[in-house]
Image: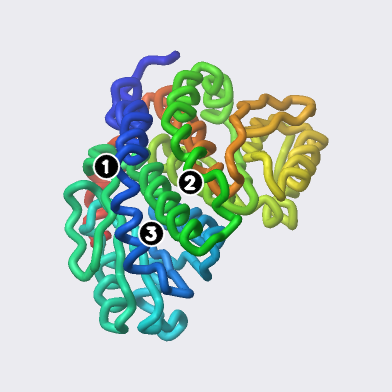
Amino acid sequence: MSSGPATDSKMYQTMQRQPADLQRLADTGWDQASRAVDLIGTSERIVLAGIGTSYHAALVGAWMLRAAGVDARAISSFDLARYPDQFPLEVDDSVIVMAHTGVKRFSGEVMAAAGATGATVLSIGSLTAEHEGSHFTLRTVERETSAAYTSSHLCAMMVLAQVATDLGERRGSDGVTGWRAALASLPEQVARVLAREEEIYPIADYAASHRTYAAGAGPNEATALELVIKAREAAYAHIDALAAEQFLHGPMVAFNESDLLVMINVAGRATDRTAGIAAVGSAMGGRLWIVGEGIDLAHATTFALPDLPEMLTPLLAVVPMQILAWQIAAIKGIDPDTFRRDDERYKAAFGLLRL
């Protein structure tokens, strides 16, 4: 593999730490999940808020909480803060704010505004994040030093999965059947995926110089969107993502035979459709990277994943996306940790606004 700043980056080191971080939560995180459910367990509606990678975790969390039997939705922290009349909160609602650092502007505004309505406010953040206005903070990992967040994102989803599991079990929901056992196996499964990084390198090498599209359905729409954030912020890559059906209905006409399609094709209710869309891409002459269940198509490479309950699959499917983004950065000789603040012009531009 090509040498470069990314090969010894904080992003890479943090990715490699993920099995240990997950194992710690698998061993000790159920107590905080139970406390959270004590606070939100009677709520019939839960709003999850976040921005960027945290918003993608919120999207996945909403799918998991709906499986647990509660009305859950993900809303951008900015939208919830600036348009509260569009998302009115009631005293019986709960709000979970995804805020790894605890310093982002709109995360704080959402916690304050939600608390003022009488809703129960929980937050998810690093081991040291301070969340003023949160009634209880669920902890994930130490604060990340790379701008390309990896373990904090995966562990935030793990925490949400534990909350959803506990809540669903208390409510007698069939939607969370087998989740405890599946989450117990996740650290080892992530370790095995990380050990297969050489399988991904040819795809990264191709993506580094070709237009790339990513698509996923159901809870894995968020997985495709997360690849875009990671590959753009880590490697300045030319990549777009959409929900699989949205990609098919219009944007796919821009797909060319030299392009790469990353299709998340995990076992579940959407498999027939994601496989069908991949077949359309293959017929167009494009190159395909299938993550999940293999599809016998021309120019397709499969990165197989073990089966998990469908709502939990983003917790594993996101790991190949992280590796792909990091490898593109390594190939291009880009430091994935800096958020381009090592360029004075970009640093000054970012300084015009408070995140």
**CA–CA distance between discs 3 and 1?**
18 Å
Nearer the observer: mark 3 or 1; the answer is: 1
Name the image quarter holding residue 145: top left
**Is 271 rendered above or below residue 116?**
above
**Is 185 rendered above or below residue 173?**
above
Mark 3 neighbour density, 10 Å: few (under 14) some (14–19) many (20 or more) = many
For label 3, the residue is 51
Q: Tell me residue 192's x, y (percent).
A: 48, 22
Q: Nearer the viewer, residue 319 or 159?
A: 159
Secondary structure of residue under mark 1:
loop
Among the two numbered marks 1 and 2 on one chain, the one whose residue lies closer to the N terminus: 1
Q: Is residue 335 visible?
A: no
Q: Residue at x 49, y 25 (%)?
A: 193
Among the two numbered marks 3 and 1 on one chain, the one whose residue lies closer to the N terminus: 3
Q: Residue at x 37, y 49 (%)?
A: 159
For label 2, the residue is 226
Among the two numbered marks 2 and 3 on one chain, the one whose residue lies closer to the N terminus: 3
**CA–CA distance between discs 1 and 2?**
19 Å
Residue placed furthest toward the right: 283
Q: Which mark is residue 141?
A: 1
Q: Tell me residue 226's x, y (percent).
A: 48, 46
Snapshot colouring: rainbow
